[in-house]
Image (tube, grey):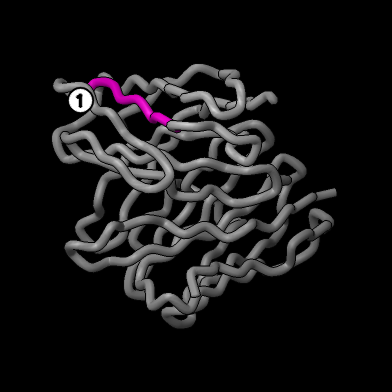
Amino acid sequence: DAKTTQPNSMESNEEEPVHLPCNHSTISGTDYIHWYRQLPSQGPEYVIHGLTSNVNNRMASLAIAEDRKSSTLILHRATLRDAAVYYCILRSDLTGGGNKLTFGTGTQLKVEL
Amino acid sequence: DTEVTQTPKHLVMGMTNKKSLKCEQHMGHRAMYWYKQKAKKPPELMFVYSYEKLSINESVPSRFSPECPNSSLLNLHLHALQPEDSALYLCASSDNLAGRIYEQYFGPGTRLTVT
């Protein structure tokens, strides 16, 4: 399985943008790039995903490098509630249905006032 | 309803006990998953069920036995566990249909301690 690498931790001030990087140099052509986050004492929560093009949704933006070997999750204005572990994940779809998520090690985001 | 529920929230069991973890979703999802998460580590996939059939077993020891009695329920039967099996066990579900987002919805997990 292809792997992702992420920094262990990052810090941000509240209401400032945050850029969370991820490297996935061995990504295959059919793998989707997903980001999930996990708040304390909760299961992971979907944030955003993409294949080749940059994506925006109400939570965040995803910038994907042209060669797809790296991506960046962008939180436009971090709040204290965004403090969590952010996982960069490669998703492969299974022929029998469902999909397989290969989690990176995660980045602990700390947000300060 | 976009909720995946898991029971119990916490479980303490001895190495000779038999127990079961339960997971339920009512989103009509036909794929369900079990993950194991150790402290400060990412979740690791254990099993995938698609249309109530086991499609992936990630070389999980036989002391963990999954069961999918219907499309809404997923169980994980535990027997003769070891202390190193103590972890957070997460259940998730997702759509199977082409064109859907394939987002996995996770439950809050069952915190298992093996003594």
**Magenta residues (range):** A69-75
Residue A56 relative to residue B59: left or right = left
Q: Secondary structure at mark 1?
A: loop
Query: Which SS does the magenta portion mostly show?
Result: strand
In the displayed image of the protein, which residue is found farthest to the bottom? B70
Examine the structure image and report whether residue A65 is included in the region drawn in magenta: no
Name the residue type under label 1. Arg
The answer to which image quadrant residue A9 occupies is: top right
Q: Foreground residue, A85 or B15?
A: A85
Q: Residue B93: horizontal and vertical position, in percent?
A: 44, 64
The answer to which image quadrant residue B101 occupies is: bottom left
Q: Residue B8: horizontal and vertical position, in percent?
A: 73, 67
Q: Residue A51: horizontal and vertical position, in percent?
A: 20, 39
Examine the structure image and report whether residue A71 is included in the region drawn in magenta: yes
Residue lying at 14% horizontally and 34% vertically, measured from the top left: A29
Q: Which residue is mark 1?
A: A68
